[in-house]
């Protein structure tokens, strides 16, 4: 082991305070042979430099020495400790990943104002073992759409990946999963099927350089890497060469299963070859999914065992496995859940025993594609989940909830108590390993939102949603992380002007959670909360007042407008634990008016980044007030239709006019700040890309205003 005393030539720096003229001299000691230790030292050195310390290599005469080392006998996996002892601060990690977390924790403390001499002892350990990002790549992504294709160039830039992976480890995520239909085309020239590759030698080398670069950057940051893909898909070139799998390639995805022996061999060998050629790739995820129509659940599982799992086990090295829960209970690609499928899947995983590296991570979509709704588990992909996977407790696998976000891409979001409650309700059982967080219809790469010309402190889309990632990552690591940690980051960025931002953001963006709890949803396009859009029939539209009245709820404690009005009309009532439309409307109004009050006096002049933070809070708040008035109008309209009371009809019109006024406020806020944005949901209920897919709140105003005419034209039923 080589101990490095790291020198950065920072000599004279600005004063740390009015009484200081010279920087304190700080020595960093770390093992330069460990890439993770070198990364930790570099990131800590950057924070010390920002705070005005002089980082050097002196063995004597230093003011402070920071020692970075791995100490597995003292600490568990991914745990860390910061131990101040006079002029020496020791940062220990239970492993290399924990060492990075410790160094970054010390760097965060420095950036939020703590001086080295004031550092106090800290020791932390992870609550959940798997804290992953689901990242859909833009090439051969799951759905064809210009909303996804537009990220192609950005996602081929290793500078982008360096920043994204920095964000992940800073927020204590520990795994990145890269999803697309058929990744092998971009990674290898199959040894026995070279005709499957569409690339020239130079083109393939460029793709391989990209993938190897991503995996190298991830490994340096202590992140596990996975490829996750759907089945059964091949390259178009392979299909045409062998006259097989005639639709099992991009952009097709709801297609028949292809079970020919040549496809089996091609895919099995591709899996093995990728694992052999990419040593920094940790694992692969499998999907019993869209390209397997016509096969029974048992046939699908046997195909997986014979092809993909066999290919992984044939690689001469350890491999991690993500096993996604099957999506269909029949022979179609349509969603469905059943006890029989659960039994088949559990038996198959248990037969693998311990042949994979660590537990098998069993991925389940929490509340289908809309986890940002209620923290109660209502459904997974296909319907209600039985207890087969949990009872008896599994020995070789862990459940990892997929917290999908198909609901907000433009507006900033941050509700820490929702995430804490989610983990408290769903993350405590021994069979739970952790969470994925990510999207299928959105890629956090190109910033296609920002309209202003003034400088902002982000370059890429994910940097706009910094609080979203910080909340999920840090709370998955430690759900007891206090709000003060997150508020401190607002103050670091914006000074005293950021004092109210966390509270205001939490209040205002709870609007999204309440809409998604009120309005039941299933797959991706069935709801887009920040736009108040939902799939209605075959088309994605603004949620009309009629649709809001009749639609069921996601959260079982919520009461739909129709159920509420009709129950009261019959003389019934609801218990105190139920969230009726009037109660929900009052909560929306209370919280969103408070959010507006908290940001009312914030001066955003000269700071476009702060302008966006405040504007997004105002936008969510006005969307919440819009929903409150819409609920009141919907209830009044349904009462009129049942009773014929003209006063209720007029009340409905009045409330819906006020709802439109709040929508106009949303337009006034967002029109100067946001471009018209491509939206995958505008593919509607079809399998082809729709190029007429621009969204902005201003573009659907006519649909919002139509609610008023619906009320005026309504008749007694």
Image: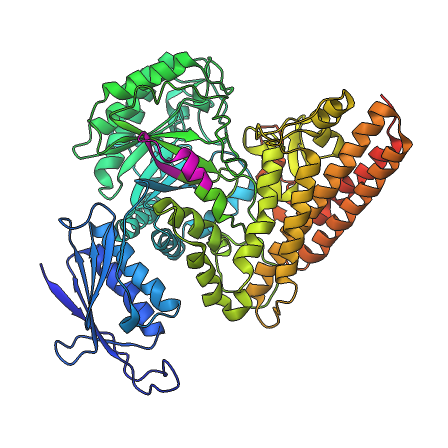
- Percent x, y for residue 311? 25, 26
Answer with the quarter of the image where residue 488 lies. Answer: bottom left
Judge whether 105 appears above or below 288 on screen.
Answer: below
Q: Is residue 674 visible?
A: no
- Percent x, y for residue 127? 32, 43
Q: Is residue 544 visible?
A: yes
In this rendering, position of residue 357 left or right of residue 49 = left
Q: Nearer the viewer, residue 371 or 195?
A: 371
Judge whether 236 appears above or below 496 on screen.
Answer: above
397 falls in the magenta region: no
In this rendering, position of residue 325 left or right of residue 8 = right
In this rendering, position of residue 199 left or right of residue 290 = left
Answer with the quarter of the image where residue 647 lies. Answer: top right
Q: Nearer the viewer, residue 326 or 62?
A: 62
Judge whether 560 appears above or below 489 on screen.
Answer: above
Placement of the N terminus among the 4 image quadrants: bottom left
Q: Which residues are magenta?
A: 421-435
425 falls in the magenta region: yes
- Percent x, y for residue 230? 41, 28
Q: Residue furthest left?
A: 1
| Residue at 36% across, 42% down | 132
| Residue at 69% across, 51% down | 622
- Percent x, y for residue 553? 62, 29
Answer with the quarter of the image where residue 26 lies. Answer: bottom left
In this rendering, position of residue 451 left or right of residue 148 = right
Placement of the C terminus among the 4 image quadrants: top right
Q: Residue furthest right?
A: 646
| Residue at 22% across, 42% down | 279
């Amino acid at each position: 082991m080589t101990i490095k005393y790291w020198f950065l030539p920072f000599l004279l720096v600005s004063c740390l305070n009015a009484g200081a003229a010279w920087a304190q001299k700080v020595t960093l000691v770390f093992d330069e042979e460990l890439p993770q230790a070198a990364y930790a030292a570099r990131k800590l050195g950057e924070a010390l430099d920002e705070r005005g310390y002089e980082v050097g290599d002196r063995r004597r005469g230093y003011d402070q020495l920071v020692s970075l080392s791995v100490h597995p006998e003292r600490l568990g996996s991914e745990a860390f400790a910061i131990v101040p002892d006079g002029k020496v601060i020791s940062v220990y990690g239970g492993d290399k990943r924990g060492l990075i977390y410790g160094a970054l924790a010390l760097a965060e403390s420095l950036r939020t104002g703590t001086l080295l001499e004031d550092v106090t002892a800290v020791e932390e350990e992870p609550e959940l073992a798997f804290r992953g990002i689901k990242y859909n790549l833009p090439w051969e992504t799951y759905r064809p759409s210009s909303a996804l294709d537009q990220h192609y160039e950005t996602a081929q830039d290793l500078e982008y990946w360096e920043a994204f992976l920095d964000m992940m480890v800073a927020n204590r995520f520990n795994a990145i999963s890269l999803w697309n239909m058929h990744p092998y085309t971009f990674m290898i020239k199959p040894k026995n099927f070279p005709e499957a590759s569409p690339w020239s030698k130079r083109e393939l080398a460029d793709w391989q350089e990209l993938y190897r670069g991503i995996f190298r950057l991830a490994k340096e940051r202590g992140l596990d890497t996975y490829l996750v893909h759907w089945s059964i898909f091949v390259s178009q070139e392979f299909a045409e060469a062998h006259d097989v799998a005639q639709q099992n390639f991009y952009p097709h995805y709801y297609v028949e299963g292809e079970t020919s022996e040549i496809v089996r061999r091609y895919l099995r060998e591709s899996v093995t070859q990728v694992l052999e050629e990419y040593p920094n790739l940790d694992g692969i995820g499998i999907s019993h999914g869209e390209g397997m129509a016509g096969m029974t659940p048992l046939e699908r599982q046997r195909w997986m065992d014979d092809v993909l799992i066999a290919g992984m086990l044939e690689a001469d090295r350890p491999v991690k496995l993500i096993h996604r829960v099957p999506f269909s209970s029949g022979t179609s690609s349509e969603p469905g859940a059943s006890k029989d499928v659960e039994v088949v899947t559990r038996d198959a995983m248990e037969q693998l025993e311990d042949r994979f590296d660590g537990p098998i991570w069993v991925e389940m979509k929490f509340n289908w594609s809309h986890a940002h709704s209620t923290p109660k588990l209502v459904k997974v992909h296909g319907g209600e989940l039985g207890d087969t996977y949990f009872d008896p407790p599994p020995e070789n696998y862990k459940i990892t909830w997929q917290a999908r976000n198909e609901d907000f891409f433009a507006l900033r979001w941050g509700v820490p108590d929702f995430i804490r409650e989610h983990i408290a309700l769903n993350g405590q059982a021994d069979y739970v390993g952790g969470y994925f967080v990510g999207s299928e219809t959105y890629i956090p790469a190109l910033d296609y939102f920002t309209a202003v010309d003034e400088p902002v402190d982000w370059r890429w889309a994910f940097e706009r949603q910094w609080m979203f990632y910080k909340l999920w990552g840090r709370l998955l690591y430690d759900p007891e992380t206090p709000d003060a940690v997150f508020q401190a980051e607002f103050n670091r960025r914006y000074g005293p002007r950021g004092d109210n931002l966390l509270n205001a953001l939490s209040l205002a963006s709870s609007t999204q959670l309440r809409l998604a709890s009120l309005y039941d949803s299933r797959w991706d396009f069935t709801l887009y909360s920040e736009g108040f859009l939902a799939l209605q029939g075959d088309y994605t539209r603004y949620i009309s007042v009629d649709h809001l009245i009749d639609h069921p709820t996601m959260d079982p404690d919520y009461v739909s407008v129709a159920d509420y009005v009709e129950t009261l009309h019959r003389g019934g009532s609801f218990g105190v634990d139920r969230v009726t439309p009037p109660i929900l409307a009052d909560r929306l109004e209370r919280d969103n008016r408070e959010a507006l009050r908290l940001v009312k006096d914030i001066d955003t002049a000269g700071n476009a980044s702060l302008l966006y933070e405040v504007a997004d809070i105002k936008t969510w708040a006005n969307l919440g007030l819009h929903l409150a008035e819409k609920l009141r109008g919907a209830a009044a309209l349904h009462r009129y239709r049942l009773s014929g009371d003209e006063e209720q009809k007029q009340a409905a019109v009045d409330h819906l006019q006020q709802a439109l006024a709040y929508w106009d406020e949303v337009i006034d806020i967002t029109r100067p700040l946001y471009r018209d944005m491509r939206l995958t949901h505008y593919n509607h209920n079809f399998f082809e890309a729709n190029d007429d897919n621009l969204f902005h709140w201003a573009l659907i105003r006519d649909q919002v205003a139509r609610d008023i005419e619906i009320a005026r034209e309504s008749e007694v039923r």
